[in-house]
Image (cartoon, helix red, strand yellow):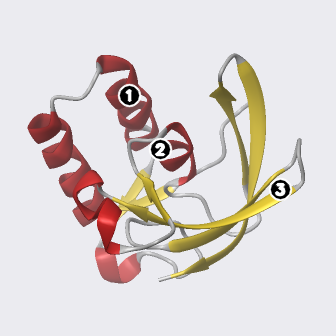
């Protein structure tokens, strides 16, 4: 198993995610992956979160290395899905995989029985 990259998450994002988990009644497999990511994260105050780190509300450009496809998405809470045209929920597999990553980092994640590798290209707050 490949080592996962170091991640940094703001304390307010963690509080919001944990609140959403309790409110949404989501399936265990959705929440456990996200909780695993949070448990290994370095937690920081909002104003201490580096600008190049993916957070809730960030517009993220990332590349799927296996296909060379590049996407730009805004990471959001399920309640904010309709706020933007390009959203991806924090509870989607890719959403929970990319939170806390910085520009240049890569992570592998499981998609329909296949592994994919995502590289963060840019982050805008």
Q: Where is residue 96 in the image (x, y as percent from the top left)?
A: 47, 44
Secondary element at image label 3: strand
Callout 1–callout 2 Cβ contact below 8 Å: yes
Q: Where is residue 95 in the image (x, y as percent from the top left)?
A: 49, 49
Residue 26 in the image: above or below residue 1: below
Q: Is residue 41 visible?
A: yes
Q: What residue is pinned by disc 1?
A: 30
Residue 85 in the image: above or below residue 101: below
Residue projecting furthest to the left: 23
Q: What residue is pinned by disc 2?
A: 96
Secondary element at image label 2: helix
Q: What residue is pinned by disc 3?
A: 69
Q: Label 1 to label 2, Cα distance in Å?
A: 9 Å
Q: In this view, does 34 lie to the left or right of 104?
A: left
Between 81 and 117, the residue placed more toward the observer is 81
Q: Quick one: quadrant of the N terminus?
A: top right
Residue drawn at the location 70% of the way across and 69% of the way down: 103
Residue drawn at the location 40% of the way across and 36% of the way down: 34
């Amino acid at each position: 198993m490949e080592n996962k990259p170091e991640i940094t998450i703001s304390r307010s994002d963690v509080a919001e995610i944990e609140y959403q988990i309790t409110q949404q009644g989501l399936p265990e497999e959705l929440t456990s992956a996200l909780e695993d990511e949070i448990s290994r994260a370095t937690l920081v105050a909002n104003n201490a979160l580096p600008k190049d780190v993916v957070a809730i509300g960030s517009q993220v450009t990332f590349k799927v290395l296996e296909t060379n496809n590049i996407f730009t998405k805004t990471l959001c809470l399920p309640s904010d899905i309709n706020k933007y045209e390009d959203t991806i929920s924090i509870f989607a597999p890719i959403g929970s995989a990319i939170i806390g990553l910085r520009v240049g980092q890569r992570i592998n994640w499981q998609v329909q029985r296949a592994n994919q590798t995502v590289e963060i290209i840019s982050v805008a707050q």
